[in-house]
Amino acid sequence: MKAVALAILALATLPPGLGQARQPPHVPPAQLISAAKHAPLRLIDALETYCDTDTPIGVWLRRFTAREALRIAWSAGSCELVNSLNPSDAGGDYCAQATLSLRHPKNRQDRPEIEIYLEDPIHGRPGAAYAFRAMFDGVDGPDYIRSRKDFEAEWRERFKDTPPPSCSDDP
């Protein structure tokens, strides 16, 4: 009993904030969404360089999926497309998600989702985009996808009439 009282007294005398769980800084969802949509593709291309590197993520997604997606609904918050087996897929507190409503879904659950991981905020502003993750029900079933080029390949495999890339990465 005496030990419990001493522990409570010790916690009560700590400076404010110490001994408490860290709360992530609040960044409004609209700011996270805007940061993801306006970030250039080069930030999520994991050390690869492609011909469309300066295209904003939101523009790329809208153009690329236009023939098959009726709507792209953006949301933000903690990362959802995470995989605890790989530390680089652990996500974090700051992500933007784009859920696609398809013109001809396979079923009610056929709603591809991409997620853009964002670094922690700096001075109340969203951090930079740094990773791409997606869940997509491709030809061979649902897949967890870690790069936009893999997403593009699976999308093109399922939707054969997807337009070719606007530029070529071939030398």
Image (cartoon, rainbow, N blue to C red):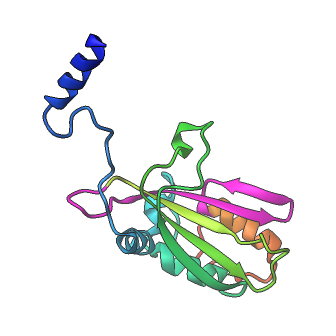
Q: Residue at x 47, y 56 (%)?
A: 78
Q: Does the magenta stretch include residue 158?
A: no
- The mark total stands at 0
Q: Quadrant of the N terminus?
A: top left
- In the rendered structure, does residue 145 fall within the stretch colored magenta? yes
Residue 10, given in percent of the width and then of the height, sits at 19, 22
Residue 52 in view (yes/no): no
Q: Position of residue 170 (x, y in %)?
A: 62, 66
- Tell me which segment is drawn in magenta: 121-148
- Seen in the picture, residue 84 relative to 49 is either above or below; the reply is above
**Left-right relation of 165 to 106:** left
In the image, is 61 to the left or to the right of 30? right
Residue placed farthest to the front in the image? 1
**Residue appearing at x 57%, y 76% in the figure:** 61
Identify which residue, 161 or 39, lies in the foreground.
Answer: 39
Q: Residue at 56%, 72% (x, y): give it.
A: 98
Q: Where is residue 117 in the image (x, y as percent from the top left)?
A: 47, 57
71 horizontally vs 155: left or right: left
